[in-house]
Image: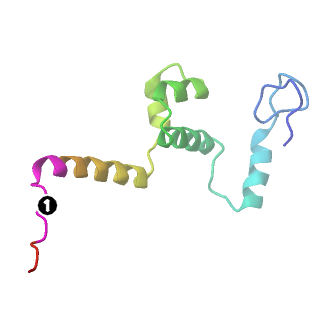
Amino acid sequence: LPRPPGNPWVIAGAKPDVPLPHINYYWYRVRKRAGLEDVRLHDLRHSFASRALALGEPLPMIAKLLGHTKIQTTARYAHLARDSVRESADRIAASIAADILPPEMPEPRRQ
């Protein structure tokens, strides 16, 4: 949907400073057309927060972007993707292993 000039809303209505009325009606149509029957409009906020966190944005900044006054609220939104958690765990494990395992011995030379 195009945003009228000067309208601050992400999903804008025809009048400035007024959000689109009956947004669920439009969201239902978008979902159906995209084949996303079980995606709620509110899920977009969760996805935004999770993506921002995965990109390294600090939680206070994400809170501000979402209009939250408490970081705890934002933390509930910002779910980490499983791959990100696994990659982080692997990096930490490799760091610990590097500190406790002896260095690799070079292969003996053949004569």
Q: Is residue 96 left or right of residue 49?
A: left
Q: Where 110 falls versus 69 (above or below)?
A: below
Q: Is 77 on the left or on the right of 43, as rendered? A: left
Residue at coordinates 75% horizontally, 51% vertically from top-left? Answer: 28
Q: Secondary structure at mark 1?
A: loop
Residue lying farthest to the front in this orientation: 111
The residue depicted at 48 percent of the width and 43 percent of the height is 54
User: Position of 104 compared to 24: left or right?
Assistant: left
Image quarter where the C terminus lies is bottom left
Residue at the spot x=78%, y=25% of the render?
A: 8
Residue 68 vs residue 101, the one in the foreground: 101
The residue nearer to you, when weighing 50 against 41, is 50
Whether residue 7 appears in magenta in the rendering, the answer is no
Residue 20 vertical position relative to residue 50 in the rendered view, above or below: above
**Residue 48, image x and y in percent?**
58, 40
The residue sitting at the bottom extreme is 111
Residue 101, magenta (yes or no): yes
Magenta stretch prevailing secondary structure = loop
Quarter location, residue 10: top right
The image quadrant that residue 42 belongs to is top right
Q: Amino acid at mark 1?
A: Glu
Q: What colour scheme governs how the chains and residues are painted in the rendered image of this protein?
A: rainbow
**Location of residue 72 in the rendering, given as x and y in whole percent from the top left corner:** 43, 26
Image quadrant holding the N terminus, namely: top right
Q: Which residues are magenta?
A: 97-107
Residue matched to label 1 = 104
Which residue lies at the image location 44% right of the left edge and 33% below the top edge?
75
Return the x and y of residue 58 as percentages of the image width and height: 47, 29
Q: Given the current orientation, which residue lies at the most extreme top position?
A: 69
